[in-house]
Amino acid sequence: MPSDLTLYDITGGNTAHLADLTSLFTQLFPQYAHRAYRLEIKAKRAADFNPRFIEHQFLAVYQEQPAGFVTFKYAPQRNLGLGIYLGVLPAFRSLRIDGSTRLSHYLIRASNEQLANDAQHCGNTPPEGYVVEVEEPKLVERYGSYGFFLLPVAYQEPLLEETASKEAITLAEGTFRPAALGFFPARPEGFDPAQPDLLRRAVLLCLVDHYGLAKDHWAVRQALNSII
C-alpha cells in the first residue's frame, strides 16, 4: 500500500473513523442518506455477526483526507463476494495510486484481496471475485476498464423499504425492477462470465442470501432458468 494512503476496515468496533465513513456515504449517495445508520450498526458489530457473511467497510484516507470507500462482504457458502457501495469524492477521482491506478480501481483490487483472505480463513479456495448490482448503465463502461464483466442472467432487483425499528430493511411488497448483475473478477485475464456454476452461485448469493428470497421465488427461478 502506498505510504500516503491508508485503508481502515470500519467493522468489529473499529469506529475511530466512522464519522468520516458516514459523511462520505451521505455525500456520494444522498438518495440513500437515510440508511447511513446501517454503516454504524455494522461498524459496532463483529464482521461475522451474520453467520452467512463476513462484512467489510473500507475507508480510504489519502494524505490524512477521507477520499473514498467501498463496502462488501464474503459469503463462505458460495465462496463469492458481494459488493454493496463504492464511491470516491470528485476531488480524488483523477488521483493515481502508485502513478497509474485510479483510487476506485485500487479499492476494487483491495476488496478482492480481502475476499481471498476471508476465503483462506474459512478453509475455501480463493474466490473468483465479487458480484455487484449496477443501477446506472454509464458505470458499466467505466468499470469495464477495471476488468468488470456483465453476467448473462435475467436478473430482477428487489426494491427495499425501511422498517420502523431501524434494525433492518425489508422488501417492498412485490416490487422488483430489471437490473444488471456484474462481476469484478480477481483475475480478469481469461475470465469467463458465462460459467453456469458461477452464475448460479451469484444469483443465489444476491437473491437468497442477501435479500432473503425463497429459492422457489419467481425472481430466483427466472434468473436460474435464464442460465444456459
Image: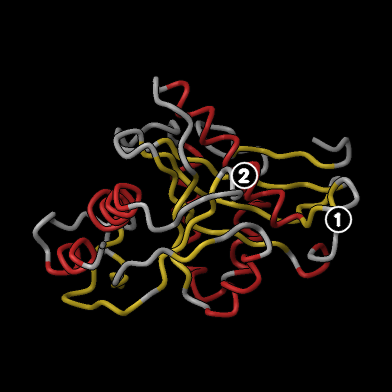
Name the disc covering residue 58, or none: 2
Q: Kindly give the residue lying farthest to the left in the view shown.
A: 216
- Quadrant of the image for the C terminus? bottom left
Left or right, 104 with reference to 224: right
* Residue ID for mark 1: 96
State the residue at coordinates (85%, 38%): 2
Residue 103 screen position, x and y as percent? 75, 55
Report x, y in % for residue 181.
Answer: 41, 65
Coloration of the structure image: secondary structure
Disc on the earlier residue, 1 or 2: 2
Q: Is 182 drawn above or below residue 121 in the view shown? A: below
Q: Quadrant of residue 113?
A: top right
x, y percent for residue 222:
18, 69
Visible residue check, residue 167: no
Left or right of 11: which side holds 198?
left
Residue drawn 13% across and 54% down?
215
| Dot 1 alpha-carbon crowd within 10 angstroms: few under 14, some 14 to 19, many 20 or more | some
What secondary structure is found at the residue carrying circle 1? strand
What residue sits 36% from the left and 52% below the top?
Answer: 195
Q: What amino acid is at disc 2?
A: Phe
134 vs 144, nearest the viewer = 144
Q: In this rendering, would 85 be left or right of 58?
A: left
In which quadrant of the rendered view does residue 3 lie?
top right
For the residues marked 1 and 2, what is the alpha-carbon distance in whole angstroms? Answer: 18 Å
Please name the amino acid that badge 1 sits on: Arg
> Pointers 1 and 2 in contact (CB under 8 A)?
no
Q: Quadrant of the N terminus?
A: top right
Crowd rating for badge 2 (residues with CA inside 10 Å; few <14, some 14–19, many 20+): many
* Disc ID at residue 18: none
Taking depth in this image into account, of 150 and 51 the one nearest to the observer is 150
Label 2 residue SS: strand
Residue at (27% x, 63% y) in the render: 163
